[in-house]
Amino acid sequence: MVTRFGIVGYGWVAQDYMLPALQAHPETELCAVVSVREEDFVNLPGGVRPYTSVGSMLAAEALDAVYVASPNYLHPEHVAACTAAGIDVLCEKPLAHTYAAAEELGRAVRAAGVHYATAYDQRHHPAHRLMRDWVAAGRLGTITQVRLDYACWLPAGWSADNWRIDPARAGGGAIIDLAPHGLDLLEMLLGQAIVQLHIFQQRAVQEYTVDDGGVLSMAFRGGALGVHTVGYNRPETLPRRRIELIGTEGMLTAENTMGQDPGGTLTFLPAAQLGGGAQVLPFDGTISPFYLQLDSFLRQRQGLATYPQRTLNDDLRLAKLLDDALAANPILWP
């Protein structure tokens, strides 16, 4: 059975990553896209119809599911419109630009009774799934510390309309954009919820009013401690994507696995050093995390058990933690 999809917010993530996933999956058909930029419609695939508003798309199309990738502040409005029409939704992170707006989104989803998922594509990278399996099997022993670094270079003029640095539309800068992926991923890898979160915000390099980087420290329910660094201020010639899980029996290190693309490396360093040093662990380095995310969404809406899973309550809990930590620790300089 083919699932008829629409896309709301046809920017670079939707065009470069979700579109190829929808085209490659045998059970999906992209029928329509919504964008306020006419230039986004220039290279639409044949048969995909363009719309400039969500309402016009919903009035004209018989859709089964919608991928929402509009700016953060529009997520509640767009999700509410789609769910009220009885359409299942896969919505980009963060849920919204504030926790109050995220709660609004949650109420709309619950009232409609449709299937909803937040698009944390990082949890679907094959290397990250393998890391989760190793932790769950106890192969690292007791996890004591975790570290995750996820950064890029994003100046004010990165795009003609760089809404990601507009506090009214994005809700913040680098932290609200990048940290939700890292926080969700660390919870997934450890199988533990974050119970405490502290944030240091910085505005050190870029010329905009929101943060251009941050350091997040956290405590997990099982006792592990974590550090997560994010930035829009990291030159892309420098290392900027690394995950370390440290346990009493060894350490897993993933490099260049964060982000939208497949690939990267994963190594295991045993604590006993009986294996002759670090071991390179194989995984499928060709399959897109977006494809696997899409497939998981399809399986979940069919009521099938999929790995990994996350609930709307989980998403709201993590959004509240992040919102509270940001409010408690504002940018101190310059």
Image (tube, rainbow, N blue to C red):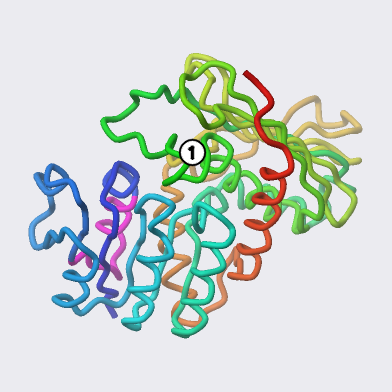
Locate the C terminus by quadrant: top right
Locate residue 89: give its quadrant. bottom left
Is residue 236 toward the left or the right of residue 306 in the image? left
* Residue 308 image position (x, y, % from top left): 60, 63
* Residue 27 covered by magenta stretch: yes
In front here: 101 or 267?
A: 101
Locate residue 306: give its quadrant. bottom right
In front here: 43 or 78?
A: 78
Secondary structure type for disc 1? loop
* Residue 312 covered by magenta stretch: no
Is residue 173 toward the left or the right of residue 334 in the image? left
Is residue 26 toward the left or the right of residue 186 in the image? left
The part of the chain drawn in magenta is 18-31
Is residue 224 toward the left or the right of residue 27 in the image? right
Q: Is residue 323 above or below residue 8?
A: above
* Residue 323 image position (x, y, % from top left): 65, 51
Q: Residue at x 49, y 67 (%)?
A: 117
Q: Is residue 318 above or below residue 215?
A: below
- Identify the amino acid type marked 1: Gly
Locate residue 295: give its quadrant. bottom left
Q: Is residue 207 above or below residue 111?
A: above
Q: Residue at x 51, y 36 (%)?
A: 173
* Residue 4 image position (x, y, % from top left): 25, 73
The residue beneath circle 1 is 259
* Residue 136 image position (x, y, % from top left): 77, 57
